[in-house]
Amino acid sequence: MDNNNNQPAYMYQPPYQPQTQYVQGNNATLGIQQADLYTPAEQSERRKKANILCIISLVCQFAPEVLAGIFSGIAESIDDLSSNSSFEPLTYVSSMIVFATYVASWVLMIIARVKYKESKFAKVLMWVYIGILAAGVIAIILVIAMCAYMLKDCHGF
């Protein structure tokens, strides 16, 4: 017999003491929401950081195209005025900058989506970018099909 509560030793259970145990699995499989892991102040701070990343991503997505259009218009105007200057290398550089910022916008959106999973702005931005990409692919396919249709009517083919 155990002298604590007059029970046999094999039936004795120690009093309940909560213990922290590591459970393997991610938060989604454990049923823990990402927002539940942070205090309201931390959630607000994380939302601000995610929004800043998303806004920078939007600027990287759309502003360079507008600036490149303005730059190329100015370059063509200057090129028309002076016959000996060539702005072709600058046009290539501006195209490379537009492509680099396009890639940077996708990278920033992915970072915001992965690091701040609770951000609705990042989720909406992801679907907008996917829609723009899909529309671009469809437009390219339509242009290729249209060119093939027009070339079929040429006498050389």
Image (spheres, rainbow, N blue to C red):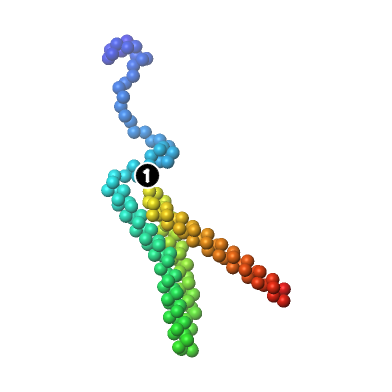
* Depth check, front residue: 41 or 127: 127
Label 1: element kind = helix
* Depth check, front residue: 65 or 154: 154
> Residue 47: x and y, percent?
33, 52
**Residue at x 34%, y 58% (from the top left corner):** 52
Residue 148 seen in this snapshot? yes
Q: Is residue 109 above or below residue 37?
A: below
| Crowd tier of the residue under label 1, counting other residues whose Cα lies within 10 Å: few below 14, some 14–19, many 20 or above | few
On the rendered structure, is 157 left or right of 53? right
**Quadrant of the rendered image containing residue 78:** bottom left
**Residue at x 33%, y 55% (from the top left corner):** 49
On the rendered structure, is 103 left or right of 148? left
List the residue tagged with mark 1: 34
**Quadrant of the rendered image containing residue 74:** bottom left
> Residue 103: x and y, percent?
46, 63
Q: Is residue 149 above or below residue 128?
A: below
**Residue at x 48%, y 72% (from the top left corner):** 95
Q: In which quadrant of the rendered image does the N terminus lie? A: top left
- Say what amino acid the circle numbered 1 marks: Gln
On the rendered structure, is 3 left or right of 106? left
Residue 115 seen in this snapshot? no
> Residue 76: x and y, percent?
47, 82
> Residue 6: x and y, percent?
29, 11
On the rendered structure, is 8 left or right of 142? left
**Residue at x 53%, y 63% (from the top left corner):** 136
